[in-house]
Image (cartoon, rainbow, N blue to C red):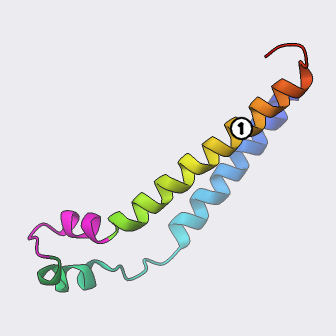
Amino acid sequence: MTVLVGVGFALVSLALFAALVATPEAPGLGALARSEIAATGVSNPVTAVLLDYRAYDTLLELVVVLLAAVAAGVLARAVAESNPGVR
């Protein structure tokens, strides 16, 4: 059984690698990012991209923290309901 799983994993990995190699190179957004660097106020393209997307990064971090708080609340309630005598 383990051998079959290994062979299956190898075949899937090979198929994914073949698909990756066969995919034509897509035009990137590098030229657009470099052309708009002056609008960001910084000279480094990596810093410009990071500064331009920091609001999205902060929003996603907030979502992760909110999901963690909700999960902690659900788990705390489940533990409290399963142990009614313990507080």
Amino acid at pointer 1: Gly
Picture coordinates of residue 19, whole percent (x, y):
60, 66
Q: Secondary structure at mark 1?
A: helix
Q: Nearer the viewer, residue 5 or 53?
A: 53
Q: Nearer the viewer, residue 55 or 12?
A: 55
Residue at the spot 84% in from the left edge and 31% down from the top edge: 78
Is 49 located above or below residue 2 in the figure?
below
Is 82 located above or below residue 74 in the figure?
above
Is 54 located above or below residue 36 in the figure?
above
Q: Quadrant of the C terminus?
A: top right
- Which residues are drawn in magenta? 41-52
Mark 1 residue crowding within 10 angstroms, few (<14) / some (14–19) / many (20+):
few
- Which corner quadrant of the image does residue 8 belong to? top right
Residue at the spot 81% in from the left edge and 30% down from the top edge: 3
Query: Along the horizontal axis of the image, is 32 left or right of 81?
Result: left
Q: Nearer the viewer, residue 40 or 66?
A: 66
Mark 1 lies on residue: 73
Residue at the spot 42% in from the left edge and 66% down from the top edge: 56
- Which corner quadrant of the image does residue 15 belong to? bottom right
Q: Magenta stretch: residue 47 in it?
A: yes
Furthest toward the left, the residue is 43
Q: Quadrant of the N terminus?
A: top right
Is 19 located above or below residue 86 in the figure?
below
Residue at the spot 38% in from the left edge and 83% down from the top edge: 27
Query: Along the horizontal axis of the image, is 31 left or right of 69?
Result: left
